[in-house]
Amino acid sequence: MLAEGFTWPVRVYYEDTDAAGIVYHANYLRFMERARTEWLRALGFEQDALAREHGVVFVITASTLRFVRAARFNAELLVETSLEALRGASIAFRQDVTDLNGQTYCSASNVVGCVAVDTLKPRRIPAPMMRKFQGGE
């Protein structure tokens, strides 16, 4: 069983919008990045500590997005994050940006790879993380 899903609230700020007053498309990726970081934090992992103690960082290797509707300034959104697949050196996430009523604004499949800090070559996900991701302690 994989780790439980995670939800992170996001408020749309003026800086997140484009000239039309809607969320600029690239900012959905920023919202999703924050949610993945907060998910790791909720599991007890800080990214700077992972780099320092395990010599690894996570990088996006693939991203597929589907834009459903436009979010506007001051909207309260939720970024729902769940694991789709877990491999030795990568994690596939399903991420949905919704409003408080459950209406979807953007959906994505994002894959992150675990790489060595110094070489950026693939490395196995550290064992303590794998245990947590698999639903264990």
Image (cartoon, grey):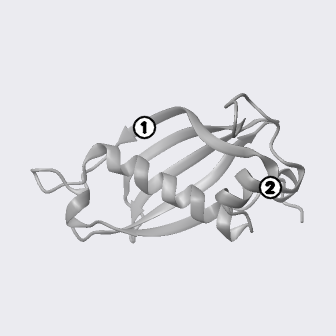
- Residue linked to disc 1: 65
Callout 2: 10 Å neighbours few (<14), some, many (20+)? few
> Picture coordinates of residue 50 (x, y %)?
74, 55
Residue at 66 percent of width and 58 percent of height: 48
Q: In this view, does 38 lie to the left or right of 51?
A: left
Within the image, what quadrant is residue 128 found in?
bottom right
Q: In which quarter of the image is the C terminus?
A: bottom right
Looking at the rendered structure, the secondary structure element under dot 2 is: helix
Which of the two discs, 1 and 2, labels the residue nearer the N terminus? Answer: 2
> Picture coordinates of residue 36 (x, y %)?
58, 56
Q: Distance between the residues labelled 1 and 2?
A: 33 Å
Q: Is residue 118 left or right of residue 95?
A: right
- Residue linked to disc 2: 53
Residue type at the position of mark 2 = Glu
Residue at 63 percent of width and 39 percent of height: 112
Residue furthest out toward the left? 19
Q: Is residue 8 above or below residue 70?
A: below
Q: In this view, does 102 lie to the left or right of 134?
A: left
Q: In this view, does 124 lie to the left or right of 72?
A: right
Residue at 54 percent of width and 39 percent of height: 109
